[in-house]
Image (cartoon, coloured by chain):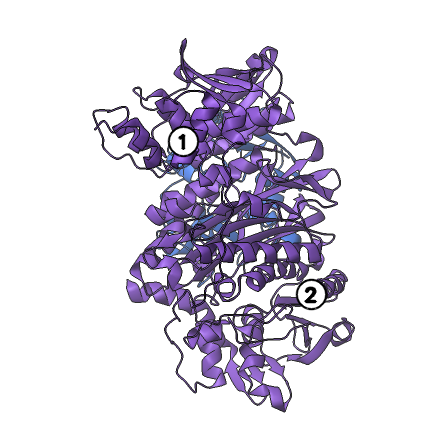
């Protein structure tokens, strides 16, 4: 089992050039521990080596920004002395291997990012992508990912307030599990991760360290260290929400009592990345003694301790005279706390096993010196993805088409998922899942201001046109916030793409980032942080390029936030634009077995201006209903309003439009259905009254009339039916 | 009325319960390691996953120091209300009859349901009338009540027809002990005290408790 040392770096994913770079920076050959640490710190996951240059294009400053990219989570000022921290992150590959633990630890990880900046987590949202639901594998992944998210979020007492799920064949082998967490803190309690204060102690908090999550490095274990047992350890981490719930309360109490100099979570690459990043940000060095790290398995090698991704751990810096009170707080919460090192002035990460030095690396080399690569984008000449199979008969009538769309899993109710999540713990949730377009959360118990949160993306539309599709994701998220009266303060994103070394994926990535940038600039919303997940490919090729966008906005009066439900007979219904529906990239086109290779251009400035006008109308409190037109077009949006309110509607579109599939089912940014007292609706700028609430059916004059009960059966029944059919 | 709300490690709804109690009286948190109830008049055992609930829901919490004091208070006739995990803890502790089993669906379910007041003659429901329907949320995986031989008057709340979320025996949502001073329920009244967050109907239970002479 003794492979030559030169091959070890390749098996760990480092190129020969990168290996030479490491040797040069060390002035010698790295030992096995150093090689393991470098291979992780210089991995795509930690170093963003294929995306960092691109991400610099995104606007990251705004009037409300308190902490931007580079910290554990982005933070915006929401007024009244309060700050909101948020971030979205992927846990795609672990979830594809083991959906329950993969999704659960995805939630656990993003929660830690948020309380690492001193914020109490108050909401989780998730964005999920699977293959089509006819596939037993996709049903299995969906079912267990949902259970995993619920297991972690429910147990830790943080509500899961929103999210989205879509099903497309290119995700069959590579599902996506993106989790976003939102937290709240008094401004003065925010803490950064930069280590500071020579001689200060580095204290490890939380769970014992085991061999879970060692992943790629297990290759090193068998090749270099010839450990007798080459049995494959599970490389998916195991989550323990109880441990984390104690850790949250403990860390927040330590911060409330001002006992910590800095705080950082342990995520990918474990101690290696957390310690070196803390040192890098503070321009200091850190000495660690791995023999002091509490272990789950006694015989762990120092390198394993350094790269273990065991969950529910945090690293903090404490002044020596405060150590005893810190340990007292930890004991009260039954949280393990162990001083394992100290801050030095060496600007090196030095690792000891007792007295014996086992690794010595310049912090700068680990954190900043990973070579960055330029992408080689090339627009593909042929379509990358096959057309989806046709699901809707040619010549299907309007009613049949509407019911087919409502029961398409991408459009259908996701009640199956969200009822498995506690969406109300914390007593902040004013608008629960499927009640409004964005979740609305109280900032303080019993009233006052509120925030709205939403997470959005549509990979199929990005596959049609990466620039416009990505810009549309930003607009849709902002529109969802607008529908409850919120103004976006900041944006977080997760870029889920295929292998960036392939020119067409590089092209998708480049164009999508440009779309994100332009939409953010048009809306004046900064990107406060995020995550990149590359190499999402199955045997059939890359996933649909899937930028996921999460936003937080502020609204003055949560009681005025409309819901998606039609509320009262006689309310006027209007469509607000600019909205130029098109079948390109639409759900109907998917059902018809076609995937477009472009989307209509979007006027970003006009979209931004329209959102600002609509926000004012919503904030007036006069509207009962506001619902964004998205998948399935206007007819589906109207049907959803009917189902939610248990009321019908009579709509007049004019003779020319009535039978026009593009008008009824076409998609595109900008469309919002609103309803309320006629005099209020007529006053909304850009609103065109198209009908009134009433009756027990959705009637689109000249096109269709479907009883609300039938709409509900299609909309609510589709996903349970898919599981029943497969059972 | 001074309410005490127990906080176990892994409790989730203790702050929600604290705020709900404070709408009707004074309230403070009680720490699981303390045997001292600090002179409170009534105790609320809140929802959550006490000690992680990795064994059986409530099975560890019943051994906590604070539960010794709660058992003593209950023995002296003091009102004790267990919500969700608190209901499970009280069943495990033998302060309430029966047990909570996994939902028929074997899934966690979070949903607004309606419950009917079956017995208004308890310290927890005296602000209600028999037959009142209350809109309150449930959220649990292990909420299917099983209580063979339960006396009719011990059923305090029943899920309204069509609202049983877990397959509970006879649609039972909440029960009391024979003496009438200990009650457990799976729905979360503490999450139904504010019109902004859904309903105020759950407040009736805390209001009832606040009417208990101290």
Q: Position of residue A432 (x, y in %)?
A: 57, 55
| Same chain assignment for discs 1 and 2 | yes
In the image, is residue A595 above or below residue B71?
below
Of the pair A486 and A709, the residue shown nearer to us: A486
In the image, is residue A632 above or below residue A100?
below
Q: Secondary structure at mark 2?
A: helix
Of the pair A313 and B38, the residue shown nearer to us: A313
Q: In the picture provided, is A711 more to the left or to the right than A4?
A: right
Q: Position of residue A172 (x, y in %)?
A: 35, 58
Chain in purple on the image: A
Identify the residue under disc 1: A19
Q: Secondary structure at mark 1?
A: helix
Can see residue A224? Answer: yes
Residue under the point 38% across and 46% down: A93
Can see residue A156? Answer: no
Residue under the point 60% across and 27% down: A281
Residue A607, disc: 2
Q: Colour of chain B?
A: blue
In the image, is residue A436 above or below residue A706?
above
Residue under the point 58% across and 18% down: A318
Q: Position of residue A174 (x, y in %)?
A: 37, 53
Label 1: chain? A
In the image, is residue B196 above or below residue A722?
above
């Amino acid at each position: 089992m003794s492979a030559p040392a030169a091959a070890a770096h390749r098996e760990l994913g480092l190129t020969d050039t990168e290996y030479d770079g490491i040797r040069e920076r060390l002035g010698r050959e790295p030992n096995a521990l150093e090689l393991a640490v470098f291979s992780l710190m210089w991995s795509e996951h930690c170093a963003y080596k294929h995306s960092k240059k691109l991400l610099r294009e995104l606007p990251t400053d705004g009037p409300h920004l308190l902490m931007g990219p580079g910290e554990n989570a982005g933070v915006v000022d929401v007024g009244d002395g309060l700050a909101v921290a948020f971030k979205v992150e992927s846990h795609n590959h672990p979830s594809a291997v083991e959906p329950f633990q993969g999704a659960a630890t995805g939630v656990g990880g993003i929660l830690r990012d948020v309380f690492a900046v001193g914020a109490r987590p108050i909401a989780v949202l998730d964005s999920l992508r699977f293959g089509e639901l006819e596939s037993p594998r996709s049903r299995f992944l969906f079912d267990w990912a949902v259970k995993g998210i619920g297991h972690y979020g429910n147990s830790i007492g943080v509500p899961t307030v929103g999210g989205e799920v879509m099903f497309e064949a290119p995700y069959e082998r590579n599902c996506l599990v993106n989790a976003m967490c939102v937290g709240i803190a008094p401004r003065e309690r925010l803490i950064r991760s930069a280590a500071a204060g020579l001689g200060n102690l580095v204290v490890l908090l939380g769970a014992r360290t085991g061999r879970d999550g060692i992943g790629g490095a297990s290759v090193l274990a068998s090749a270099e260290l010839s450990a007798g047992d080459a049995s494959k350890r599970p490389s998916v981490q195991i989550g323990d929400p109880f441990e984390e719930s104690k850790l949250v309360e403990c860390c927040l109490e330590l911060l409330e009592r001002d006992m910590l100099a800095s705080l950082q979570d342990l995520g990918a690459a474990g101690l290696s990345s957390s310690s070196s990043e803390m040192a890098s940000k503070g321009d200091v060095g850190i000495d660690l003694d791995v023999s002091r790290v509490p272990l789950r398995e006694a015989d762990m090698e120092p390198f394993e301790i350094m790269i273990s991704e065991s969950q529910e751990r945090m690293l903090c810096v404490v002044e020596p005279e405060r150590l005893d009170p810190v340990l007292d707080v930890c004991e009260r919460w039954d949280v393990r706390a162990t001083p394992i090192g100290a801050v030095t002035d060496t600007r090196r990460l030095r690792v000891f096993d007792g007295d014996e030095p086992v690794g010595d690396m310049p912090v700068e080399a680990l954190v900043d010196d990973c070579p960055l690569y330029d992408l080689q984008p090339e627009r593909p000449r042929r379509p990358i993805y096959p057309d989806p199979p046709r699901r809707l008969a040619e010549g299907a009538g309007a009613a049949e088409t509407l019911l087919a769309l409502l029961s398409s899993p991408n459009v259908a109710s996701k009640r199956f998922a969200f009822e498995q999540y506690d969406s109300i713990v914390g007593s902040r949730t004013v608008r629960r899942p499927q009640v409004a377009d964005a979740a609305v959360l109280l900032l303080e118990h019993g009233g006052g201001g509120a925030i709205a949160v939403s997470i959005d993306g549509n990979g199929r539309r990005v596959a049609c046109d990466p620039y416009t599709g990505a810009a549309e994701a930003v607009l849709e998220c902002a529109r969802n916030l607008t529908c409850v009266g919120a103004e976006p303060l900041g944006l977080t994103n997760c870029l889920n793409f295929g292998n960036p070394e392939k020119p067409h994926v590089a092209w998708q990535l480049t164009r999508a980032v440009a779309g994100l940038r332009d939409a953010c600039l048009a809306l004046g919303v900064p990107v406060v942080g995020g995550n990149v997940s590359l190499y999402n490919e199955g045997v059939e090729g890359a996933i649909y390029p899937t930028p996921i966008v999460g936003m937080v906005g502020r609204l003055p009066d949560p009681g005025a936030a409309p819901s998606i439900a039609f509320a009262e007979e006689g309310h006027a219904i209007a469509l607000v634009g600019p909205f130029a529906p098109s079948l390109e990239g639409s759900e109907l086109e998917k059902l018809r077995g076609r995937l477009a290779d472009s989307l209509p251009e979007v006027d970003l400035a006009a979209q931004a201006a329209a959102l600002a006008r609509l926000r004012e109308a919503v904030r007036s409190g006069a509207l009962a209903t506001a619902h964004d037109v998205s998948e399935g077009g206007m007819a589906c949006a109207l049907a959803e309003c009917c189902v939610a309110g248990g009321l019908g509607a009579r709509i007049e579109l004019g003779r020319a439009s009535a039978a026009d599939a593009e008008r009824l089912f076409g998609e595109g940014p900008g469309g919002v259905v609103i309803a309320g007292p006629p005099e209020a609706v007529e006053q909304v700028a850009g609103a065109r009254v198209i009908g009134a609430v009433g009756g027990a059916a959705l009637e689109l004059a000249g096109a269709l009339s479907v009883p609300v009960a039938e709409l509900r059966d299609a909309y609510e029944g589709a996903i349970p039916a898919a599981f029943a059919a497969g059972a | 009325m001074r309410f005490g709300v127990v906080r176990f490690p892994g409790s989730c709804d203790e702050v929600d319960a604290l705020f709900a109690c404070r709408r009707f009286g004074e309230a403070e948190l009680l720490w699981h390691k303390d045997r001292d109830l600090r002179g409170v008049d009534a105790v609320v055992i809140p929802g959550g996953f006490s000690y992680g609930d990795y064994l059986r829901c409530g099975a560890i919490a019943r051994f906590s120091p604070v539960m010794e004091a709660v058992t003593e208070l209950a023995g002296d006739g003091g009102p004790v209300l267990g919500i969700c995990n608190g209901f499970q803890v009280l069943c495990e502790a033998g302060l309430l009859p029966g047990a909570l089993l996994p939902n028929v669906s074997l899934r966690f379910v979070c949903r607004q349901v309606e419950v009917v007041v079956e017995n208004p003659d308890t310290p927890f429901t005296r602000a209600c009338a028999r037959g009142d329907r209350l809109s309150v949320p449930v959220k649990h995986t292990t909420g299917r009540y099983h209580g063979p031989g339960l006396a009719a008057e011990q059923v305090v709340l029943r899920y309204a027809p069509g609202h049983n979320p877990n397959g509970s025996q006879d649609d039972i949502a909440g029960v009391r002990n024979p003496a009438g001073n200990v009650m457990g329920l799976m729905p979360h009244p503490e999450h139904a005290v504010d019109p902004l967050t859904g309903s105020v109907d759950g407040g009736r239970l805390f209001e009832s408790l606040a009417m208990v002479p101290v």
